[in-house]
Amino acid sequence: MQPQNIALEEVYRLADEALQNNGCDEQNANAVARTITRAERDGCASHGLFRLPGYLKALKSGKANGRADPKVEQLAPSVVRVDGDLGFAPLAHERGRSSLIELTRETGFAAQPIIRTHHFSALWAETEPLAEAGLAAFAFTAYMPSVAPAGGRKPFFGTNPLSFAWPRGDGAPPMVFDMATAAMARGEIMIAARDGHEVPAGAGVDADGAATTDPKAILGGAQLPFGGYKGSAIALMVELLSAGLMGEAFSDEAAARDNRDGGPPQGGELLIAIDPARFGDPEGWLEHSNQYLERLGALEGVRLPGDRRRTNRERIAKDGVSVPQTLLDDIAKLAGA
Amino acid sequence: MQPQNIALEEVYRLADEALQNNGCDEQNANAVARTITRAERDGCASHGLFRLPGYLKALKSGKANGRADPKVEQLAPSVVRVDGDLGFAPLAHERGRSSLIELTRETGFAAQPIIRTHHFSALWAETEPLAEAGLAAFAFTAYMPSVAPAGGRKPFFGTNPLSFAWPRGDGAPPMVFDMATAAMARGEIMIAARDGHEVPAGAGVDADGAATTDPKAILGGAQLPFGGYKGSAIALMVELLSAGLMGEAFSDEAAARDNRDGGPPQGGELLIAIDPARFGDPEGWLEHSNQYLERLGALEGVRLPGDRRRTNRERIAKDGVSVPQTLLDDIAKLAGA
């Protein structure tokens, strides 16, 4: 079956309507639909409409609160927390963002723990708006166990992504990266299993802990962190920052309390924002770092992180989004009120 | 020739005397000698006496200021900078540490840019004291170009280490990791070249950008980041945080202004400190995260980052440090007043 080509407005409408039909109030549905549309806009299909069935399942099971009313509370002079009220993360981010930006401009450096949300989106969509406001930003979040720590053979860490964004001045798109600390995205392994392809060495181990390129064996065994024991240490850091620090669930705890409805588990996230104008080089930092990024981007064979997303954005604005018919069918089936 | 076995007191005395004989005042010499001794104490020979010749060369050439008087200045409510006065980093860290700890306890979250120092030490020695004070901590620093960005073939990034430390409560050693963003330490590649051994695939490329396991070809070509394009993005993040943010030199700029005396170049560093007691779970965070680290450490085959250093520490306190005679000879030759 041919994939359907649909405009971004239609992506938004599809998501928003399905969410509102299944228990989201307008604010929550709009925020999730904006996040999904933003992902499709940049060609990041794995975090676009592909996630909508999971959101809907979490509403149907009652795990996520579709009428969440996230609250912002300052915990310390440089710490402003968002309590997501057990809703989906996008509204919690939208509610907390202006407080984090203001506090960072005031103090130079601030943190935003986000608790009690169900997180299912790409982190770049959360750091990029901070960099568009002129700040550098980090995001860290844990997930459900799927990655074996270096040396181990059983899933323990989540795929635990981290994102970093650096501002490039008025109107210029920030430099943004967003990476899972797993060697390979779980979705890619699932697609390889479905299609009967091998995955590259290093992606995971089978149930006995032996290295394998068989995606089905990895799904029954464990994924591996990127970069061996170094990536494993970074995955551990993400657990401590997004769970231990703020009284939220580590990946293994999140799995234990999840109802396995296929939607996102409840967990925490840490945002960090930095105002480069307050670090000693207020006049020079922007040109200095822009020149550096230009030197880097001019190297033969080198591409700046995030460049592909921006190329996609231009193409998709013109051509619309290609969505598999099976996904549209799944959504139609789940979306009925 | 047999390596010499010497006590930690003797390591300290050797370093302190050599530094004072070559233009360091007492405060600067003591601080560097403490840093070197701390590395040897934990079995981290690559950052122990091995670095003393480089420190001495930087004093002899006049590049580093042996009588540096680092100054601490608050730049914003959560940002306290150290200006190292062109000396070696250890005294700058010692001078700045209490201000960073105090500010973090006050605000919950604080940053310390460190500029105008010559840095030649392990980052764990800088984050661990913050975690011993009950804070979580990051450190980031760039260096001289030796690593090709993912896709490239010429050295551009430094080996750009990052460290993270997490406190484990009164008297318990913190969880600390410290990793270069290069796939392999440059020192190990140099030793393999000297001894005629191959290095593992992925460590670097030759001058034409072709993958190789010949360490000499890599030293004439470029090292590679750990973990492919993900490690490369982290190396870029370290450049932006330790140079762009604070008006210090990116790795390529640091190399351009260095006099190539073999000692450490001038550069910047960023420390971040977090008070977990101010993030919403003041009563629970310590036990919660300690239990998690215990679950992780109990997994078959898994070792917590930093465990090896602590095992070394116990052994070396009893047995002393094994130092190659050739290194002691080099030091003796350089150390004469």
Image (cartoon, coloured by chain):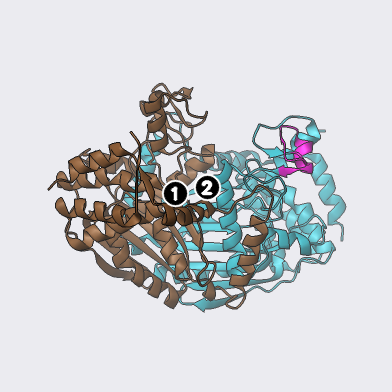
Chain colours: A brown, B cyan
Q: Nearer the viewer, mark 2 or mark 1?
A: 1
Residue shown at 73% from the left, 40% from the top: B209
Q: Quadrant of residue A323?
A: top left
Q: CA distance from mark 2 to mark 1?
A: 9 Å
- Residue B206: x and y in percent read 75, 39
Which residue in the rendered view is the most extreme toward the left? A337
Q: Residue at x 45, y 30 (%)?
A: A204
Kindly tell me whether residue A265 is visible in this rendering. Answer: no
Q: Is residue A3 magenta?
A: no
Residue assigned mark 2: B177
The percent position of residue B53, horizontal first and vertical second, equals 79, 53
The vertical placement of B275 against A286, above or below, is: above
Q: Which mark is residue A237?
A: 1
Q: Is residue B218 magenta?
A: yes
Amino acid type indicated by mark 1 = Met
Q: Is residue A80 left or right of residue A233?
A: left
